[in-house]
Image (tube, helix red, strand yellow):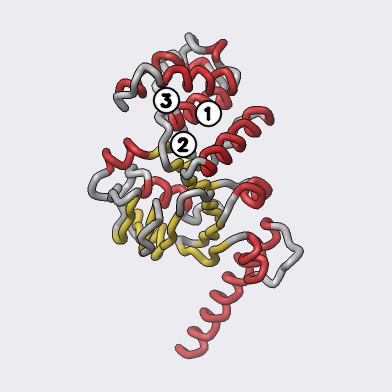
Amino acid sequence: MSNNALVRVKDLVKYYGEVKALDGVSFEVYSGEIYGLLGPNGAGKTTTLKIIAGMLKPTQGHVEVMGISPIHNPTEVKRIIGYVPEEISLYESLSIIEFLEFIASVRKLSPSVWTYVFTLMRSFDILKYSRTPIGALSYGTKQKVAIIAALMHKPKILILDEPLRGLDAKSAKILKELMNLHIQSGGAIILSTHIMDLAEHLCTRVGIIHKGKIIAEGSISDLKRLADAPQGTLEEIFLELIREREEVAHIIETIKRGLSE
């Protein structure tokens, strides 16, 4: 693994019972880049992100986040990252302000953080809901609260699992701008998304995960060469690489059956 990577993932394996969700996943993420983790439903994206964020232990493999193992020291990793999970879970009896105060308290943040928090709340147009119980908010507004909670301590690394889900067009644009500002300041982002256009325009590099394995990785231009599709969109490249993988698997299975007969 490279010495200057902010996030290092090596040979991750994860079983859920008899189901192998991850099968040797490896990649690295560097300062100043957005790494897109793309794949069909059930490919292993969320499982991978949960392991990096210290929310889940792998069956095998190694992970380092700024030199710290989320497997052995998940609390320390949670302190230095910002994580927006695919399924947000907030304290719904608390108001937005109460919830963010709780997060600030847990993270032992300085009172000066509130200047930034209120700027984010104004940007996402949720100041008017600041005293509203979270349980009474729309899904999109809850998503904005989760994003602010992930950003408020200005972490070096952001882990974003479908972060645009539920956001209106204006808020989605603001989040994309915040992501660009984050990497311009030397941070890194791992992004999982189904929105191929978003990944194509934002991501520095992309890893395509299929059935628990990274089957292709590189810049968009790298993937275009790999898929022999110089004019193709990321969505077309994604579908082509998945199709080729399925075809190879089918051929191998046919050969195996022939050998056993």
Q: Which label was assigned to residue 90?
A: 3
Q: Which residue is the site of mark 2?
A: 84
Q: Amino acid at mark 3?
A: Leu
Q: Position of residue 219 (x, y in %)?
A: 59, 60
> What type is the residue that disc 1 sits on?
Gln
Identify whether 228 is placed above or below 210: below
Marks 3 and 1 sit apart, C-alpha to C-alpha, by 10 Å
Which is more foreground, mark 3 or mark 2? 2
Q: Secondary structure at mark 3?
A: loop
Q: Position of residue 23 (x, y in %)?
A: 40, 64
Marks 3 and 1 in Cβ contact (< 8 Å): no
Q: Is residue 124 above or below residue 229?
A: above
At 55% from the left edge and 82% from the top edge, which residue is drawn? 254
123 to 161, vertically: above or below: above
Which numbered tag is attached to residue 191? none
| Residue at image point 31% right, 27% down | 107
Say few, some or many: other residues with alpha carbon within 10 Å of mark 2 (under 14 / 14 to 19 / 20 or more).
Answer: many
Q: Position of residue 186 (x, y in %)?
A: 47, 44
Label 1 secondary element: helix
Residue furthest front as drawn: 185
Q: Which mark is residue 143?
A: 1
In this picture, residue 103 sits left or right of residue 202: left
Instruction: Give the mark count.
Output: 3
Q: Nearer the viewer, residue 32 or 164?
A: 32
Mark 3 crowd level (few <14, some 14–19, many ≥20, 10 Å Cα):
some
x 51%, y 15%: residue: 136
Instruction: Residue 109: give x, y in percent of width and height.
Output: 33, 23
